Amino acid sequence: MNVKYLNPFVEAAYEVLTQETGTNIQRGELALENGSYVTDDVTVIIALVGAVEGNVFYSMSQTTAVQLASRMMDEKLRTLDSLAQSGIAELSNVITGRASMKLSDSGFEATISPPTLLIGKGASISTLDFPRVLVPLQTSEGNMVVHLALRQGARTGLKTSQMAVPSSPLS
Amino acid sequence: MNVEILKPFVEGAAEVLEFEVKTKVEKGNLSLQKSALTTDDVTVLLTLVGDIRGVVLFSLVKEVGLRMVSRILEQEFLELDSMAQSGIAELGNVITGKATVKLSKAGYHVNISPPTVITGKDVKISTLDFSRIVVPLKTELGTMEIHLAVREDKQNQMSTADDFAEPVEASVILQKA
């Protein structure tokens, strides 16, 4: 995977987590995985379509999810209820949105999908032929791992209206 | 949710299953679900962006998935190995691709994301504030469920400058005439 795709996500995750949850964040060792990913308690899935395409997962334990959601909403949440779920999904959505803006600044225009939340340990998620880069983020509320399974889009997102048209027929 | 959005998926699925898996397809009763989906053995997840945004899920029991893949690839599969997973993902991808072609004919421009395959029973998938329309498709090999959690997002298209550029060109041509 192109390292140009990686940095926007690390930066965005850092910025958003610091702003929204006020935690201290440290990046762990990067890893590359080819097999399927066996889920942690909570996983948010967001897809990218455009000049960069693929999937991004944000995985964490239930405790971390509840803690982060509590911090975000400034309210003590105890269980992973629908409010906490929506908070975690939104957090991932904001991180991905910000990363996609950074990607677009470096010339990779991409649209992001709405988030999907997966709850339950032990399922396995396969991104098929996309290898995944794992970015562990250590926060004071626990670890969050960002999985990036991205590649250059087959469709570059060029619309017919953006294609160059000669002003007169070629002779 | 608009029926115009639902129909392309049901038709697309029926066409693809009939062609690739060579089975008759019968549509079961539709239902609307708000709570999280508790997964069957295999779930293919694809997302749509563009004039329609949301998630499409194809949910299958392991045996049904294996039977379908065996038919598609004309080879007996007994385990959900990476080849079988890739076959099931491709099936979901082709159905969704076909549906988007039909949607574009109806005036909705949609792009689809690469598929993700989730294996493992009893995991909950929540589409949050998107409610899901569930369409069971009965085939000779078993049932496949399509879950559609999508909504229209027409403004999305209007926000780009290029879309406003076209009418200007058209008016210039009109003036010349």
Image (cartoon, coloured by chain):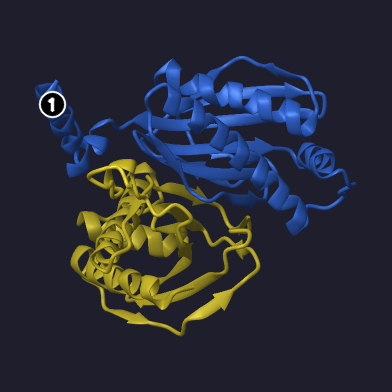
Chain colours: A yellow, B blue
| Residue A80 to residue B60: above or below | below
Which residue sits furthest front?
A171
Instruction: Specify whether A22 is left or right of A136.
Output: left
Which residue sits furthest right? B76
Q: Quadrant of residue A10?
A: bottom left
- Name the residue at 67% across, 40% down: B91
Residue A27, above or below B68: below
Q: Secondary structure at mark 1?
A: helix
Q: Is residue A60 visible?
A: no
The answer to which of A40 and B94 lies nearer the viewer is: B94
The picture places residue A89, in percent across and down from the top left corner, at 36, 51
The residue carrying mark 1 is B171
Asked if residue B46 lies left or right of residue A169, the reply is right
Residue B101 % position (x, y): 50, 31
Task: Residue B169: name its quadrant.
Answer: top left
Q: Which chain does the residue under circle 1 lie in?
A: B
Kind of residue at disc 1: Ser
Q: Residue at x 39, y 60 (%)?
A: A65
Residue B60's place in the image compared with A122, above or below, is: above
In the figure, is residue B126 to the left or right of B68? Answer: left
Q: Position of residue B94 (x, y in %)?
A: 62, 39
Nearest the eye: B123 or A96: A96
Nearest to the observer: residue A9 or residue B24: B24
Rendered residue at 27%/69% (across/down): A106
- Number of callouts in the render? 1
Query: Camera-side residue: A106 or A56?
Result: A106
Q: Is B72 located above or below residue B10 in the figure?
A: below
